[in-house]
Amino acid sequence: MANIPYKIYLTEKELPQYWYNLKAVMKELPDPMLNPATLKPCTKEELKQVFCSELVEQEFNAKDKYIEIPEGIRDFYRMIRPSPLIRAYYLERMLNTPAEIYYKFEGTNTSGSHKLNSAAAQVFYAKEEGITTLTTETGAGQWGTALSMACAFYNIDLTVYMVKVSAEQKPYRKAVIETYGGKVIPSPSDTTEIGRKILAENPGTGGSLGCAISEALETAAKTENCRYVLGSVLDHVLLHQSIIGEETRIACEKYDIKPDIIIGSVGGGSNFGGLIAPFMGDKIAGKNNIHFIGVEPASCPSLTRGRYAYDFGDTGKTTPLIKMYTLGSGFMPSPNHAGGLRYHGMSPIVSKLYHDGYFEARSVEQTRVFEAAVAFARCEGILPAPESSHALCVAIDEAIKCRERGEKKTIIFGLSGTGYFDISAYMSYNNGSMSDYVPTDEDLEKGFATIPRI
């Protein structure tokens, strides 16, 4: 083996003190969110009716490249961070590739994913503001789990609307959320007006993140001293996840690792955006020529087959209008096993970077994803989450290309979480009952028809 250790750990003193704000370095900013009633840019005052004040300030911040992480949040981070950057020596050996492969592993905390990075921040700010109750949505359950952990730590009540198909597929994830004190409601439900409306229009639906967001927003609006928090998509969430990229950058500088390719899974975009943030900032400044690849499921192809347009962030059409790559807020994805990648839209920052040609997007079918996941588990000893395995799948593809072309490249991918609550999915793959769900053009047109004409 080379001089680079298998696991690169940073010390507590190397824990980043600042988040990296991509908007401060972008040549062109994403278009602003619009009030759907007036079609004018949303004001801070309007958003503060839904979100915590400091989060709104971060959402609008396009000036400060670095935003300080408060000590109260760093205090929480010290329990779970820094996370390791791992050289995948055994994966390299299995693939017989000249490529160097590294993965930034975010699954070392109890929630099992990167989601805790933003959950801790959002709950901390809610506590500082005197908020006593939060509502949210969750797909695969990673965000709900992370938020329940943070709410328990900061002593705030939580209601989680979990996509119904995920709640059915992952009862143990639901149990963990409840163990930390969160209340879980499968969505769509009969507990909200929008939930009842969606059920009436789509009997038997397995739900979507858009549905769950609508229910969480309605509950937040009707509950005293309550705010809604979102696990992906919005700019402030991507900002919090930039700690992943900052730690990766520090580790690369420490061991003189120069990445040629950086790969991340994309659902709402905050995980991918957080991983690439400082590296993308340098690329925008002309300081590197890294090839960035965002990988999404073929069953919910927002970037690769979506439209760049203003759209609602939820199925109930209650959110501001967001300029993003979207399949339409009315799109109902197939019940694939990558529950955290079932959102119809994409982060405005990620969407703008993609639209301007700064990275490549690919979609992969879930059987290929699980083939990669099983191979990785057998050689590296970690059972990866289905979401994370999208990035892993393409990292393997790129490493094989290096072998075939005789090229030595350095590949980094984000292993954003573990798959220990996804055993039913692995069972489906192992027994041969897993199939690939790829929407037809006709399926997509039904979703596109729900995009507002602006």
Image: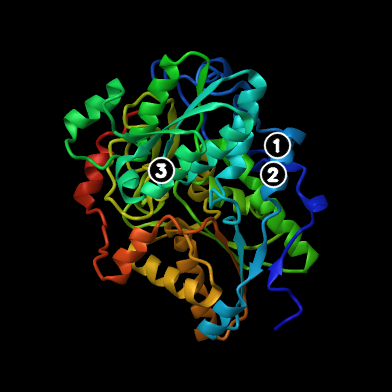
Left-right relation of 445 to 214: left
Q: Quadrant of residue 117?
A: top right
How far apart, in angstroms, are the residues tagged by discs 3 and 1? 25 Å
Q: Could you say which disc has been placed on residue 73 in the image?
A: 1
Q: Disc 2 marks which amino acid?
A: Tyr
Q: Relative to 9, say whether 273 is above or below.
A: above
Q: Quadrant of residue 435?
A: bottom left
Crowdedness near tag 3: few (<14), some (14–19) or many (≥20) residues, C-alpha within 10 Å: many
Residue at the (41%, 43%) spot, across then down: 174
Question: Between disc 3 and disc 2, whose residue precedes?
Answer: 2
Q: Quadrant of the N terminus?
A: bottom right
Q: Are marks 1 and 2 in contact (CB under 8 Å)?
A: yes
Mark 2 secondary-structure assignment = helix
Q: Quadrant of the C terminus?
A: top left
Q: Position of residue 430 (x, y in %)?
A: 32, 71
Q: From the image, tell me which residue sits under label 3.
A: 174
How far apart, in angstroms, are the residues tagged by discs 1 and 2? 6 Å
Residue at the (65%, 67%) spot, across then down: 86
Q: Position of residue 196 (x, y in %)?
A: 24, 25
Q: Depth check: 399 or 281 in front?
A: 399
Question: Between disc 3 and disc 1, whose residue precedes?
Answer: 1
Mark 1 secondary-structure assignment = helix
Q: From the image, tell me which residue sits under label 2.
A: 77
Left-right relation of 297 to 253: left
Q: Could you say which disc has been placed on residue 352 in the image?
A: none
How far apart, in angstroms, are the residues tagged by discs 3 and 2? 24 Å
Disc tally is: 3
Q: Relative to 66, say whether 105 is above or below.
A: below
Residue at the (22%, 54%) spot, across then down: 440
Q: Position of residue 87 (x, y in %)?
A: 65, 72
